[in-house]
């Protein structure tokens, strides 16, 4: 094999050029890409850790709030129960008072009604008496009585003239 | 009441003596429009009750040589030409008893409120001669209406006649209603005579009285618009007769005639149908006597005659604010003062719409409580000065400080005189409010806040200064210690209610 | 001329009429009288005479009315 010196130099320069261009065009971007990827992965890992931490805090908050709410609810429930009992007692007392007041009112009104009824009955009795008198007299007068009454009337009138 | 008592007088049948007597009669020669002309009826008296048989009654008003003019009161449908007209020998009267309080009756004394018939006690004549001068006494007791503007500036005394005059829809009946509502627990019996009103209005009025517990001491005499002119003509006299029943027992009575304009119109209708000659505005010649004989019966009697009183509040409706028309001038000259209501004031929000300048009470402070007299003197002055300056109110930015202060004071004083019809103020409440207003304690409060200021102030005074409240309620003169209390009350109120006293930056 | 109205429960006989007219004529001797006879059943019995603004009512109806007003 003949090793030609210019060929070697040419090859060396060629190689150098290729190396130069590779480094610039391929080597560096690829490295950069790898770096970027590494960075991204690191960030993602950090974010994931943060999220995990927040989740834990939220869980803790949730538990404490729930506990407080439960306590409050229980307190309100107790108060409501107490109030309801009180109200029921008051209502009972008040209705008892109302009933006795109504009783008094009713008995006085009843007495008044009775009095009015008796009075109106009096008027009815008077009317009935008159109607009866009319009927009895009207039907009991026959021809002879009529004549007698008319004669009597004429005499009375002549007198009072 | 046992049964034997009620039926006792039925046995008087045994003792009655039935004989033929001759009765004076006439025959109906013409009947139209509620007027019957009858011939004969030779010895009938003027104003006598006559009977047409079948529960028909009338009053003989026109006694002439050939015929008698009779106005029909009841049984109008059954009268026929040629029917007999019988004298009853009785002058027109109405039967009144203690049970009439709380009832609604017609001018003949018959109950129209659907409840039981009214017990009979005394027959009171509808036409009566007013008590003489010797039997009377000067008006010296106040009649509290519960309305600040009236009780402070136009005070009404028991036994006075005070006319309420104004156009339609100015609140005349509301003032009357407020006065009745304020007479609760004051031992005053009220009679409300409704002449020619709509039945719906009257029903609402009675419902309001009942809801506020006022019907228990009020009698309502009703001759509404669908009743005959004869009943409308008699209604005020019936109301007066009911009032006189209680006057004779030494009570204080308040009578309200709502309204006398319709009364004069009913009388005009009757007079024209009776063919009496007509005068100014077609009213008959004696329309002044119609009202003067009615209103003169309102009086204050001296102790020897029972010490009772009748206070009359007649109401007159003017047309277009014309107080110089015939009937308004007549009644103004009869009454002891008037409360003049104006439409402009009403529409601009001033209710009660009383024109303080034109309203007057001729009895005045003789019938006013001492405490009220003290605070009201300066009130009138403030209002009068405000009225003079009111025309400049539009230029309020260009005025000097003194005028502006006067205007502000006047605005606030006018504002506190506004009052809703259903709010009655007692003497103490009125004195408190007016004292605060005339002494400048309201000058720092906004005009629009004044009504809430009033409510809270009075509640505060009632709760925390109960003694002062009670003293003021008696109406005695405000002396040093009470004034101190008043000032203290206001200062404390200012401290505890700062929201009214925000200063502008 | 004076109008006299006589109302009775049943028709009057001539004798009765003559008797009435005679006494009325005696009372109002100066006037000329015109008699008007009517039969009104609601009087029940008896008769009523109205003359010159006066009524003489002796019928049973009138007596019952009197009774009614008394009690």
Image (cartoon, coloured by chain):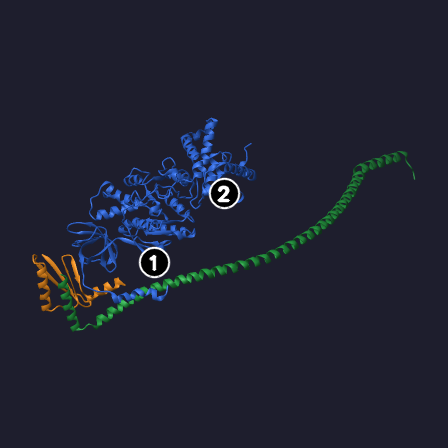
Chain colours: A green, B blue, C orange
Q: Is residue A11 visible?
A: yes
- Residue furthest front in the image: B304
What quarter of the picture does the C terminus of chain B occupy? top right
Are the two marked residues, 1 and 2, in contact with CB atoms closer than 8 angstroms? no
Closest to the observer, B140 or A2:
B140
Is disc 1 in the same subunit as disc 2?
yes
What quarter of the picture does the N terminus of chain B occupy? bottom left
Identity of the residue drawn at 79% across and 37% down: A25
Estimate the x, y position of residue A104 in percent, counting from the top left: 46, 60
Closest to the observer, B435 or B13:
B13
Q: How many marks?
A: 2
Estimate the x, y position of residue B430 in percent, counting from the top left: 45, 41
- Relative to A146, B230 lies left or right: right
- Residue furthest right in the image: A1
Disc 1 packing (10 Å; few <14; some 14–19; many ≥20): some
Of the numbered discs 1 and 2, the one sitting upstream in the chain is 1
**Residue tagged 2:** B469
Give me the chain letter of mark 2.
Answer: B
**Residue tagged 1:** B119
Closest to the observer, B261 or B146:
B146
- Relative to A63, A131 lies left or right: left
Question: Measured along the vertical axis of the image, is residue A149 above or below residue B294?
Answer: below
Name which quarter of the figure residue B368 lies in.
Answer: top left
Label 2: which secondary element: helix
């Amino acid at each position: 094999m003949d090793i030609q010196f210019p060929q070697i130099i040419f090859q060396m320069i060629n190689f150098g050029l290729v190396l130069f261009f590779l480094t610039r065009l391929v080597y560096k971007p690829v490295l950069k890409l790898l770096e970027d990827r590494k960075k991204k992965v690191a960030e993602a890992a950090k974010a994931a850790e943060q999220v995990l931490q927040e989740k834990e805090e939220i869980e803790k908050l949730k538990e404490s709030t729930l506990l407080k709410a439960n306590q409050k609810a229980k307190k309100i429930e107790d108060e409501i129960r107490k109030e309801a009992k009180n109200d029921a007692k008051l209502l009972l007392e008040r209705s008892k008072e109302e009933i006795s007041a109504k009783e008094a009112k009713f008995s006085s009104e009843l007495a008044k009604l009775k009095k009015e009824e008796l009075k109106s009955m009096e008027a009815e009795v008077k009317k009935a008496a008159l109607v009866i008198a009319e009927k009895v007299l009207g039907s009991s007068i026959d021809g002879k009585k009529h004549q007698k009454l008319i004669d009597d009337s004429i005499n009375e009138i002549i007198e009072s003239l | 009441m046992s049964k034997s008592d009620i039926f006792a007088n039925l046995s008087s049948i045994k003792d009655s003596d039935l004989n033929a007597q001759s009765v004076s009669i006439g025959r109906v020669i013409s009947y139209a429009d509620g007027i019957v002309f009858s011939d004969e009826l030779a010895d009938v008296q003027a104003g006598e009750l006559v009977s047409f048989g079948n529960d028909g009654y009338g009053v003989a008003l026109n006694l002439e040589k050939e015929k008698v003019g009779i106005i029909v009161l009841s049984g109008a449908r059954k009268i026929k030409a040629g029917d007999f007209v019988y004298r009853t020998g009785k002058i027109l009267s109405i039967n009144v008893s203690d049970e009439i309080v709380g009832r609604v009756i017609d001018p003949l004394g018959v109950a129209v409120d659907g409840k039981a018939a009214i017990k009979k006690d005394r027959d009171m004549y509808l036409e009566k001669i007013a008590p003489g001068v010797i039997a009377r006494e000067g008006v010296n007791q106040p009649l509290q209406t519960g309305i600040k503007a009236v009780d402070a500036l136009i005070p009404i005394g028991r036994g006075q006649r005070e006319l309420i005059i104004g156009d339609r829809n100015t609140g005349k009946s509301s003032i009357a209603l407020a006065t009745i509502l304020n007479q609760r627990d004051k031992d005053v019996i009220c009679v409300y005579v409704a002449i020619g009103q709509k039945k719906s209005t009257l029903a609402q009025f009675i419902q309001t009285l009942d809801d506020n517990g006022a019907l228990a001491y009020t009698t309502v005499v009703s001759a509404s618009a669908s009743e005959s002119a004869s009943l409308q003509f008699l209604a005020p006299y019936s109301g007066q007769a009911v009032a006189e029943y209680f006057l004779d027992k030494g009570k204080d009575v308040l009578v309200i005639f709502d309204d006398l304009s319709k009364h004069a119109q009913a009388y005009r209708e009757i007079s024209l149908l009776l063919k009496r000659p007509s005068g100014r505005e077609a009213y008959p010649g004696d329309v002044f006597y119609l009202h003067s004989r009615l209103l003169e019966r309102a009086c204050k009697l001296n102790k020897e005659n029972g010490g009772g009183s009748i206070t009359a509040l007649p109401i007159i409706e003017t047309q277009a604010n014309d107080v110089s028309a015939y009937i308004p001038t007549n009644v103004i000259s009869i009454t002891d003062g008037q409360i003049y209501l104006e439409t402009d004031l009403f529409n601009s929000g001033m209710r009660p719409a009383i024109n303080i300048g034109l309203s007057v009470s001729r009895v005045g402070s003789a019938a006013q409580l001492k405490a009220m007299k003290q605070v009201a003197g300066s009130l009138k002055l403030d209002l009068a000065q405000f009225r003079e300056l009111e025309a400049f109110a539009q230029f309020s930015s260009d005025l000097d400080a003194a005028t502006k202060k006067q205007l502000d004071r006047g605005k606030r004083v006018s504002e506190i005189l506004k009052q809703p019809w259903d709010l009655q103020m007692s003497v103490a409440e009125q004195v408190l409010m007016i004292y605060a207003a005339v002494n400048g304690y309201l000058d720092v409060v906004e005009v629009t806040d004044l009504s809430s200021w009033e409510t809270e102030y009075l509640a505060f005074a009632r709760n925390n200064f109960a003694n002062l409240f009670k003293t003021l309620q008696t109406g005695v003169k405000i002396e040093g210690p009470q004034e101190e209390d008043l000032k203290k009350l206001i200062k404390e109120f200012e401290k505890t209610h700062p929201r009214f006293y925000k200063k502008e930056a | 001329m004076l109008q006299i109205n006589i109302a009775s429960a049943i028709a009057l006989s001539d004798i009765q009429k003559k008797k009435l007219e005679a006494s009325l004529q005696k009372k109002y001797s100066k006037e000329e009288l015109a008699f008007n006879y009517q039969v009104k059943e609601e009087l029940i019995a008896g008769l009523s005479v109205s003359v010159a603004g006066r009524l003489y009512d002796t019928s049973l109806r009138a007596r019952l009315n009197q009774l009614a007003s008394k009690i």
